[in-house]
Image (cartoon, grey):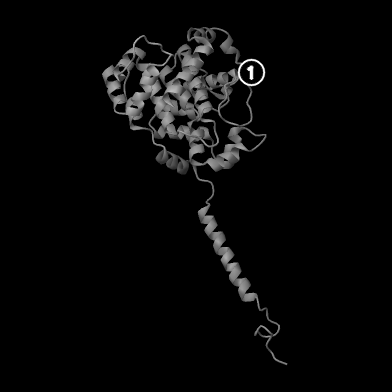
């Protein structure tokens, strides 16, 4: 009887051992390659670098931020805006909208600055630039997101005036306060979708589990990267903090948080499908001085008209 099997191998040996060993080596190689192609969660700094490179703040916005209201001239602001044809067209569309209702047509950036005022044009220009950094969304309702953010900015400005805080920064901080969420949607849409799908936990708990940081932390870091003032970046970073945990209810951070609470209570959708947060109307808005300040601003009807005008003209 031959010592060799029908496969030509010594009797008692495994004729498929070499094939199985080669297959195991190939599987290990594929697993190693997949590990390289699908790295673990990125750090906050890594995501910030990616987002900042993908969606830089337009240069015109940086120049507007550098202006000093006390020393600027309408010609200076108009000259900066005029360097960006798309921004100029959007501002003129806003200036000629039914919301402002001027008797004559505004045709130059300088006329817009003179008639609308420095603050209105500055706010509109910065809002347009921020909207330009991300012109679409994957997991969010883009229009609802900006309507909510701009409404928060307008009401934060109302609050800041009452509290004696910087009302210009308040508007910008309100508009910017969830820019980190939009950045995650642009840079990490699949991971954000995973966070959005987590039931029975808050938005920030879900983000912490998936990313290791929250959109508030990313937004604050992005604001600093874009050279917004430290106080504004802090307001963005801490906009999700409990109001009772803030040391100063009159701070810029508190103004943004209190405005955001009212906008949610008003029932304006924010473009996000996270679990609902409490929506009881804050009592402070129902009595002076806030009720008076809001009424002087035209009430929520006028606020929403301004929101619609800004989103419709600047998007």
Disc 1 on helix, strand or loop? loop
User: Is residue 288 positioned above or below 251 on the image?
Assistant: above
- The residue nearer to you, when weighing 290 against 118, is 118
- The residue nearer to you, when weighing 107 against 134, is 107
- Residue 231's x, y, as percent? 43, 25
User: Is residue 194 positioned above or below 223 on the image?
Assistant: below
Residue at horizontal 45%, vertical 22%?
A: 312
- Residue 90's x, y, as percent? 38, 24
Extreme residue in the right direction: 1
Find residue 35 and report its image quarter.
bottom right
**Which residue is denoted by mark 1 in the rendering?**
280
- Residue 54's x, y, as percent? 42, 40
User: Is residue 33 positioned above or below 108 on the image?
Assistant: below
Question: Image quadrant for the C terminus?
Answer: top left
Residue at horizontal 38%, vertical 17%?
A: 95
Residue at horizontal 57%, vertical 18%?
A: 262
- Residue 135's x, y, as percent? 45, 33
């Amino acid at each position: 009887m031959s010592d060799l099997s029908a496969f030509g191998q010594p009797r008692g040996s495994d004729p498929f051992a070499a094939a199985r060993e080669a297959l195991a080596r190939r599987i290990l190689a594929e697993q190693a390659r997949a590990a390289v192609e699908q790295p673990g969660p990125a750090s906050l700094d890594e995501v910030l670098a990616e987002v900042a490179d993908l969606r830089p703040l337009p240069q015109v916005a940086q120049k507007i931020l550098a202006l000093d209201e006390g020393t600027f001239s309408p010609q200076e602001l108009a000259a900066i805006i005029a360097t960006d044809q798309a921004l100029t067209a959007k501002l003129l569309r806003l200036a000629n909208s039914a919301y402002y209702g001027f008797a004559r047509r505004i045709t130059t950036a300088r006329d817009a600055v003179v008639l609308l005022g420095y603050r209105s044009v500055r706010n509109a220009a910065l809002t347009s630039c921020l909207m330009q950094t991300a012109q679409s969304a994957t997991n969010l309702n883009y229009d609802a997101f900006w309507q909510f953010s701009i409404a928060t900015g307008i009401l934060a400005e109302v609050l800041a005036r009452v509290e004696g805080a910087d009302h210009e920064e308040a508007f910008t901080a309100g508009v910017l306060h969830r820019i980190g969420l939009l950045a995650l949607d642009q840079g990490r849409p699949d991971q954000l979708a995973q966070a959005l799908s987590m039931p029975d936990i808050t938005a920030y708990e879900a983000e912490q589990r998936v990313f290791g940081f929250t959109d508030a932390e990313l937004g604050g870091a992005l604001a600093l990267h874009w050279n917004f003032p430290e106080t504004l970046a802090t307001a963005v970073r801490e906009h999700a903090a409990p109001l009772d945990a803030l040391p100063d209810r009159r701070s810029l951070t508190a103004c943004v948080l209190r405005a955001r609470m009212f906008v949610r209570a008003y029932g304006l959708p924010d473009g996000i499908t996270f679990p609902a947060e409490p929506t009881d109307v804050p009592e402070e808005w129902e009595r002076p001085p806030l009720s008076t300040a809001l009424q002087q601003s035209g009430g929520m009807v006028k606020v929403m008209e301004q929101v619609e005008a800004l989103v419709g003209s600047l998007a």
